[in-house]
Amino acid sequence: MIDGVAFIRDNYPTISNSNDPTIYRHLYHPDILWCPPSLPDKTGVDMVAFCYGMKDYHIYVELLEIEGLSGDDFSYVTGLVQVDTLTKSGEFIERIVLRGSWVVVSYEGKPCIRYQVWNQK
């Protein structure tokens, strides 16, 4: 059984808040489909890590709510996430709330995100 809710809850905010693409990439399946809000979709963990590293701001993520359905082969997770964007020197830019949807699968014996879709609220 894949507990996607626990995986997202216990890993996504901390790893995202690192703002480090070499750490961030460990959340994802090699063939991730990553759909950020208001930007083109990206595929593959190398492209996701590259884009994450190229952003000109830092983020601070907080899960507001999370729920999901777990199964033997995958878990579907959805939740509301508050994202604060900050300059790289730490000055506040803006706060947005997003609805995240994740499909979590097992890859090489570990849970990882196979699909991630964001919608701005």
Image: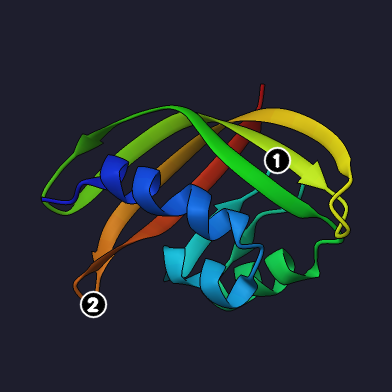
Residue 38 visible in image? no
Q: Is residue 102 left or right of residue 104?
A: right
Say above or below: 64 vs 44: above
From the viewer's perspective, is 110 left or right of 99? left
Q: Nearer the viewer, residue 61 or 74?
A: 61
**Location of residue 53 in the rendering, given as x and y in whole percent from the top left corner:** 73, 70
Name the spot of residue 1 as percent of width and height, x first.
10, 50
Q: Give SS at disc 1.
A: loop
The earlier-in-sequence mark between 2 and 1 is 1
Q: Which residue is mark 1?
A: 37
Q: Compared to 121, does 109 lie above or below?
A: below
Q: Residue at x 48, y 63 (%)?
A: 32
Closer to us: 15 or 90: 90
In the picture of the structure, the residue carrying the numbered disc 2 is 108
**Residue 102 sits in quarter:** top left
Residue 78 vs residue 11, the one in the foreground: 11
C-alpha distance separating marks 2 and 1: 29 Å
Amino acid on which disc 2 is placed:
Glu
Give the structural element (helix, strand or loop) at label 2. Answer: loop
Which residue is found at the position 80% from the left and 69% from the top? 54
Classify residue 78 as left or right of residue 25: left
Residue furthest to the front in view is 90
What type is the residue that disc 1 sits on?
Pro
Residue at 67 percent of width and 21 percent of height: 121
